[in-house]
Amino acid sequence: MTEKSFKNRVKELALLNELFEKGTAKLIILYGRRRVGKTELLRQFLEKHKGLYILARQESDIEQLKKISSQIAEFYNDDVLKLNPFASWDALFTYLSEKPRIPIVFDEFPYIVQSNKQAVSILQDYWDNKFSKKDSFIVLCGSSINMMEKLLGKKSPIYGRRTEQILLEPLKFRDACLFFPEKMSLKDKVVYYSILGGMPAYLLEFDFNRDLKENIIENIVRKNKFLYQDVLFSLREELKEPRNYFSILYSIAKGNSKSGQIVNDTGLEKSFVNKYLGVLIDLQLVERRVPITEKKSARSRSGVYLVKDNFFKFWFKFIFENQEYIEQEKQEKLVDERILPELNAFAGRIFEEVALSEITRSGKYKDYLFGRWWDRNSEADLVGLDRLNRRILIGEVKFKKLSRAESLKIKSSLEENAKKINTFGFEQKLAIVCLDCDYEDPELEIIKLDKI
């Protein structure tokens, strides 16, 4: 990712700058999924503060030390170190602890742990006795969420030493739009976001001067392409039994949102499904939701599971189940027959998520806590609760321009749902979120997403 393509991450960059400028000892854990932009964020930060960037690799302990010695020697222009690499992690940490205070980043730190399980214990010793006493600033960064979570756990040698932990998440819609041409319509931006999601590396793969069909054919549904391969690669990197996880993600992508439905669809035992769902939640690939009016309890029977990442949703819905098209090199037929006919409906569901995200960010609704609501027979796309001021906003989201007749029909449906939802007796407002609507009604709030 080039400097030109580095987008947003304003808050995260400001946080790192603020932490460094405090001048106190910092041991920071920064983690997140592959392709989310961790390395570029850190490079932008290090460029400002002239810090040391150390990249670990999947190799033996000896080769790891040689490579890292070379990186450190080049940074400090140390000719002696170039010829005599560190023979141990003790030697490496001693060398760094004697240098003036600068940011030091260990990227892909889990690879160091894989090559030498004692490296974390050695770091802990040097942190306690040298680095922390010199107000050092060290960032341990990694893409293996499983491994990074272990570094945060009670059994880790550096448990209690870390001063901050930062989970870098995919970009929200408004931030992802920075990758799209300004002249692109809101509808098209939603469609592209519904496919690519908020992963910067994915957003950079499309050429937005070409049409959508061409982009899908050339960048997703060919086996040699990064976007086709990355879902498989990411899951195989993190998981020991990827086949069962594939089945669960595919089941959820098809619309099976409850654990019982997933069990029936996959044929896996319930105990295994629950275990696998927990792992997928930890990996930020699946999320569990309950209606906004309920507490988020594991015992809630209303809880549903959703694929969290847009591109994973797209891949498992349209690619995973249609691989025979790709095997027979009928990519255009796949796009024409299977993807484009359903893409608008698929993007419409993502638009509901976009609406929730955007309204949550809006200052007008800052006192509301937003979510969705459902029971066995009905649902509401958007419900905002302001318990302090006893107010409720109940809305429906439509990925289209609405006519007066359609708006009136939605209003009637919202009034029926409100009887079930507003059991608190709060002051009530009904709303429609849409791409465009000319209808006005004093009892109905029309929210155009591009006007928020």
Image: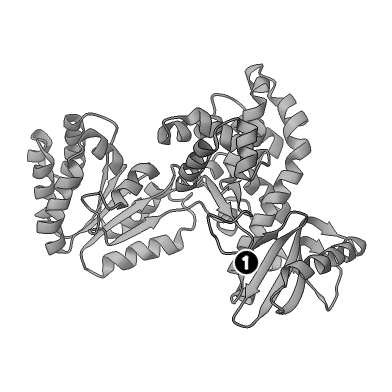
Amino acid type, mark 1: Phe
Image spot of residue 204 (x, y percent): 53, 43
Residue 211 visible to an observer of this rendering: no
Rendered-image quadrant of the C terminus: bottom right
Rendered-image quadrant of the N terminus: top left
The residue closer to the viewer here, 129 or 4, is 129
Q: How crowded is mark 1: few (under 14 residues within 10 Å), some or many (20 or more)?
A: many
Relative height, residue 343 to residue 323 (above, below): below
Image spot of residue 199 (x, y percent): 52, 46
**Which residue extends farthest right?**
405
The residue closer to the viewer here, 409 or 17, is 409
The residue closer to the viewer here, 368 or 30, is 368
33 sits left or right of 66 in the view: right
Residue at 56% x, 48% y: name it: 308
> Which image quarter: residue 47?
bottom left
The residue closer to the viewer here, 385 or 275, is 275
Image spot of residue 105 (x, y percent): 27, 50
Q: The residue tagged with tag 1: helix, strand or loop?
A: strand
Residue 63 visible to an observer of this rendering: yes
397 sits left or right of 291 in the view: right
What residue is disc 1 on? 370
**Which residue extends farthest top?**
328
> Which image quarter: residue 296?
bottom right
Q: How is this picture coloured?
A: one colour
Residue at 17% x, 33% y: name it: 66
Count of number-bearing discs: 1
434 sits left or right of 402 in the view: left
Image spot of residue 368 (x, y percent): 61, 73
Relative height, residue 351 to residue 236 (above, below): below
